[in-house]
Image (spheres, rainbow, N blue to C red):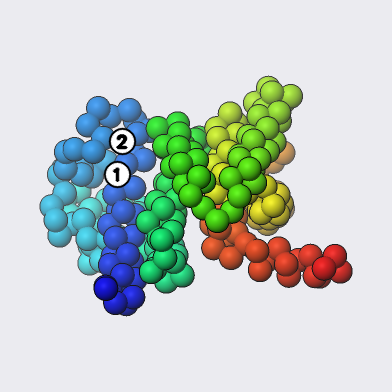
Amino acid sequence: MIPPSYVITLSTIMGAVLGSFTTMLVWRLHHDQKRIFWGRSKCPLCKNKLGPLQLVPIFSWLFQKGKCSFCKEKIPMYYPLTELVFILMFFFFSYKFHGTVEFLPVMAIVFFALVLFIYDTKFQEVDRRISIPAIFIALIWAFFREIPFPDLLIGGVVGYLFYAIQYWVSRGRWVGAGDAELGVFMGLVLGWHLLIPAMFFAYILGLLVAVPLLLMGKANGKTPLPMGAFLIPSLLLFFYNGQPILDWYMGLLGLI
């Protein structure tokens, strides 16, 4: 049996690798490049191919002082921050779920959730080449989980309808069509009983971001904000420890 410390360490390293991979993946998907999974990474500015030492997650950015080795242009913080987010999430989820039969599907869900988060945050859209496989994996896993399948299925339907109706009523002004796919994904992962508080928390996160931007004059009532930037963190939070959070909140309201 592999010691837990090895599993957690390897998972954390894998998180770093997948974080670096994701920065390349979302760029190629967004720009509809033909060779998405093949071909060496390039600097998006000078187009020079990057070597192995220039692709070490976080450390390459630090050693190069945040600049491209070739053109010396600044490398955005987006790259090391993405890798750091993956590292932290893979560490926390592997720490909790290592040694369980749920470990591999949990880590797959975390990976797809983070890719959706990065893509939507950067480009303000949901790519179906990511969301559909994520929904498919969540649906297949739903058949084997301890949570009753009807609860998960109802969660997926509720998540879809919540955003699909808003999209239809507002003709795309309130939410995007892809947000309905995020809703399905969230519902299938959390089930309806955790989906509702998770969506509520996501809107609180949105307010915490939108209000300061409005007060500083950096946004107005028509400024679009990517829903996935708030839905996915809420999904991961409630996926990790949702029931205790819900119990605490219900107790605070005196409902339990």
Quickly name the residue at label 1: 24
Q: Amino acid at mark 2?
A: Arg
Report whether residue 91 is seen: no
Q: Position of residue 135 (x, y in %)?
A: 48, 38
**With respect to residue 91, does 139 lie above or below?**
above
- Secondary structure, mark 2, is helix
Q: CB of mark 2 within 8 Å of CB of mark 1?
A: yes
Name the one closer to the observer, 209 or 163. 163
Q: Amino acid at mark 1?
A: Met
Quadrant location, the C terminus: bottom right
**Residue visible at 58% across and 65% down in the picture:** 241
**Residue visible at 29% across and 77% down in the picture:** 3
Judge from the rendering whether residue 80 lies leftward or rightward of residue 251; answer left or right: left
Task: Categorize mark 1 by other alpha carbons within 10 Å: few (<14), some (14-19), many (20+).
Answer: some
Q: Position of residue 45 (x, y in %)?
A: 26, 41
Q: Position of residue 14 (x, y in %)?
A: 29, 60
Quickly name the residue at label 2: 28
